[in-house]
Amino acid sequence: MGSKKSKPQPIPDFETPWRDIDWNKKEHLEAELTNIQLNHPELRCVRILLHGPVGAGKSCFINSVQSVFQGEIKTKAFEQANAKKSCTKKYKSYTITDKNAVILPFVFNDVMGLETQDEDGIHPKDIVNAMLGRIEDGYKFNPISPLSDGDPGFVREPRLEDKVHCLVSVVPASSISRMDTGIINKMDNVRKEAMNLGIPHVVVMTKVDDAVCPLVNEDLTQIYRSRKIKEKMLESSHRLGPPMKCIFPVSNYHEESNMNNTKDVLILTALLQIVKSAKDYIEEHHS
């Protein structure tokens, strides 16, 4: 009987990574994020709004960030595998804490996922309401009718801390090519409103190791040597608007029971850019 042949290893598409990243800087990234100084009397945290299609991994990204800072897998925001409908029904804020229970200087807001049909998923106007700080925490979204002045849950005089300081689109690398035009149009309208308000826009591209590229499936550290991942990022830029420098591929914790340094560094790298963008916005528009 002959010996079983080993499976050939995928070959990187680029000889050197096209984006520099240091896989040994996890502690440095954590420290930088923990010690961010906002220098604004009204703010202790920047507010980050996540939005995107159903099943993109918005809640999972929040849980992944919390897991990184806790050093173990955490499930703070409710998740549902292979969701066809949004599992997020209410507007909710999530603070992030470290191992010593210290609240970190950024807070996430999660919203209902976008869907193709107008009667399903969050109404784009409610994403704008959230950016403006007009929605109370715990408000239950109505896909057919966005929140308006006089409705329960509407905030007439939002404080700066209620408003959003960075808009983050969460999209899956595995299906960005197939994302319905209706959803893309809704996201484009939200982006335009953010631009009118001066709010920065960052894209977090999830599910990079979900059968997108054999090289990355085998070794996540090769992510910036993968032509397929770069193509998915370029497509995200083309369809959603932000330049490549504002698009960050990540691999959320969704099936693991142990932490992974490579995942952590990708997540922290994306988060640091998001928080820096939010801080720049505050300094430019609210100093």
Image (cartoon, rainbow, N blue to C red):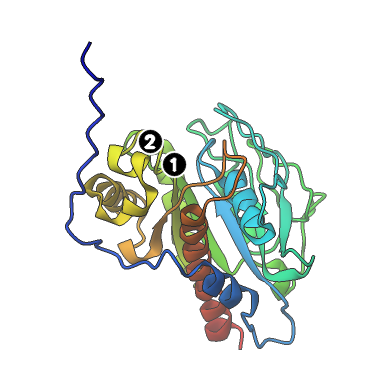
| Quarter of image, res 11 | top left
**Mark on residue 224?**
none
> Horizontal placement of 50 versus 203: left or right?
right
Question: Which percent across, then down, holds residue 144?
Answer: 63, 35
For label 2, the SS is loop
Q: Quadrant of residue 6?
A: top left
Question: Who comes first in sequence, dot 1 or dot 2?
Answer: 2
Q: Position of residue 36 (x, y in %)?
A: 61, 80
Q: Amino acid at mark 1?
A: Lys
Q: Quadrant of the N terminus?
A: top left
Q: Are marks 1 and 2 in contact (CB under 8 Å)?
A: yes
- Percent of width and height locating residue 10: 23, 40
Q: Is residue 255 left or right of residue 151?
A: left
Nearest the viewer among 200 and 23 is 23
Lateral position of residue 93 relative to residue 170, left or right: right
Count of marks placed on residues:
2
Q: Mark 1 against mark 2, which lies toward the viewer?
A: 1
Report the residue marked by disc 2: 175
Q: Which mark is residue 207?
A: 1
From the viewer's side, name the closer residue of 39 and 119: 39
Kind of residue at disc 2? Ser
